Each structure stands twice: as C-alpha cells, then as structure tokens.
Amino acid sequence: MNSTTPFFSIIIPMFNTEKYIGECLDSIMMQNFSDYEVIVVDDGSTDGSCEIVSRYIKGKLNINLLKQKNSGVSAARNLGIEKARGKYIIFVDSDDFLVNESLEFLMNTLLENNDLDMLFFNYYEVGSKKMNKHIFRPQFLGKKISENTAIQGLLTDVGGFCWNKVYKRSLLLDSRFDTQITFLEDLLFNVSVVTKAKRIMSVGNYLYGYRWREDSIIHTFQSRNMSFFNALNKIQSKISKEFDVLIDVKRRMACIEFASNFIFLNRVEYSHFKKMFKKMKSFQNFENNGLTKTEKVSLHLSNVSFGIAVIALKTKFKVDRFKMLV
C-alpha cells in the first residue's frame, strides 16, 4: 500500500465466501472513486476465497489481504481496525456489496458535514430474484440525531449492523468488537461507539446490498448464538433505563425465535427457551415502542400461548425466506 492516508478504509472480514467475494470487491473497485484502501481479513477460509482475493491484489497498491486462524468475525474486524489508516472506516461483509456510487456520495456527505463521528445509511435486502428497500422511519433521519435517538435506531429501524454505517477512525481508537460475543456483536459494538460520538447523522439513501443467504450465520441457529443474551445484558448496562422495554422485547423475541429452531427437533432445547420465557413477567406494552408488526403479533400471541407464538414466527420466517431466496 502507498504511504498516503486514504479517505476510507474498507474492512472486509471473510470466511469461505468464494461465491461472493469477487462481486463484493468489484462493487468497490468499479466505482468512480479511488481514495480508499481495502483490507480483507481472511478468518481461516478453507475454500478458494483467498485465491480469488490474491488475483485482485495483483497490481493494486490499495488492496491488502490479511490472514488469521479461524477466530470469528469480531477478531477479523478488530484486526482490520488495527491496520486501518483511513480517515473513515466502512465495514463490508464479504457476501454483500456496495451499491452504485456509494463511496462518492458518502465522501461528499462527510465533507459537507466535516464534524461527523458516525453516519448511518440505508440498504437493500437482496434475495436470489428480488431486492427490497429497507425503510428508516423519519425520526431516525437527520443531520444531527441525538445519542438516545441513535440508540433507539440501533435497537429498531437502523439496526445494530456495522455495515450500514461510517465511522471516523479516531472514534474507534479505543473501541473493539467483543470477541466473546458471537451473536449481536455488531449491536454491542455500535452502542458502545454511539455513547462516545459527538455528532451522528443518518441518511435514507440506499447504499448497500445485504444478501439473504439460507446458510448465513444470522439465518441459522447454533449453540454459540446463546451469547445473544450476554450481549443484551452488556448493552443494557451501557444505556439509559428508558430502553429497558426494547431490550426486554429483544429477550422475549430471542426466546421465541430460538425455540422455533427446536420445536419439532429437540424438546429439551425447546423447553429450555420456553421456561426462560415463562420466567419473564407478562408483557402488555406493545404500542409506541418502535416495535415491528412481527414483534407485536408474536408478543400478543405469546400472552396466549408460547407454542402458538413459536409456530407463527417459524411460519413467517419460512415465508420470508421463500420470498427472498426462491
């Protein structure tokens, strides 16, 4: 890489995404903007991902491939942060892509608002045959949104993802992803960073393509997803009590969703989440908390029957996946 400071450092954690990494890199390199460095951090891939990246690196000074033994996406992102030299940092997942001239738009927005610490932007949800726009509600858009509004956005519309945000690199000097958290690590990271940010801006422009994959970690259940509850506890300890309802909703929805993975396969695991849910007090505060329609319906049903709520949510997820992936 050259010695000058790039405007953006684009960090791409990668693990066995040979099918997508080329499109991901193309979406960056084919834009009419070149003041960036790309840092691909391979997390111990066993497929042809590294060979593909190596071909892209040839003749390029602004693309770098780092390798680590398989340690998880948080460790990969942390290594990228440590090596980044840009004024701003963007995270891109290796199976996703940037849309249109997103880098030029982001640069112009940052230059026009040169005291920004964080910038949120909107995205597309991409299936095999369709691309849906994700929607931010108006209260989460603006040139200067408060810390509390930003946190509410992370818990609801904006999402806790790190890939639909830009960070001033100086803001992340002492911030890292928690490598002990393997699910919801993005949200924990972003809540921590938001509490340090002085100015946050959010735009509704669609600049990122988030790819729906049947085999992606976020759409499959593994035992390590149990760190979800540890992450929520850590998040709750960092924010105001006014967000307790939203945190409580996430705990309840996690019990329902995780139980849906076991209801017809493992009664012991299913019963574990059912008991966890039953220990929570009855929940009636459905309105004016930024809940989605799915959350409202699930929580209403759970007050009648946990099993009905689980089956209803499992059915909805199957329908959503079919619409996006077929």
Image: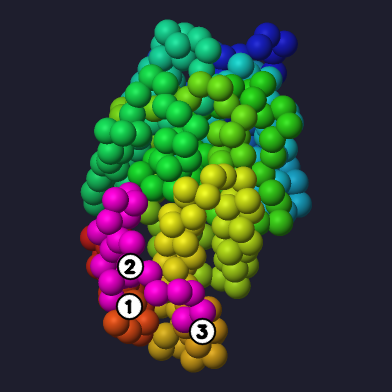
For the N terminus, the quadrant is: top right
Cβ atoms under marks 2 and 3 closer than 8 Å: no
Q: Where is residue 75 in the image (x, y as percent from the top left)?
A: 70, 46
Q: For the residue marked with disc 1, what is the amino acid?
A: Asn
Cβ atoms under marks 1 and 2 closer than 8 Å: yes
Frontmost residue, 75 versus 129: 75
Q: What stretch is highlighted in magenta?
A: 278-301
Cβ atoms under marks 3 and 1 closer than 8 Å: no
**Which disc is residue 284 wearing?**
2
The span from disc 1 to disc 2 (Cα, nearest Å) is: 8 Å
Reading the image, the residue beneath label 1 is 303
For the C terminus, the quadrant is: bottom left
Name the residue: 64% across, 25% down. Answer: 171
Relative to 121, residue 262 above or below: below
Name the residue: 42% across, 8% down. Answer: 112
Reading the image, the residue beneath label 3 is 275
Residue 207, by quadrant, is: top left
Q: For the residue marked with disc 3, what is the amino acid?
A: Lys
Element carrying mark 1: helix
The span from disc 3 to disc 1 (Cα, nearest Å) is: 14 Å
Crowding near the residue tagged with mark 1, few <14, some 14–19, many ≥20 C-alpha atoms within 10 Å: some
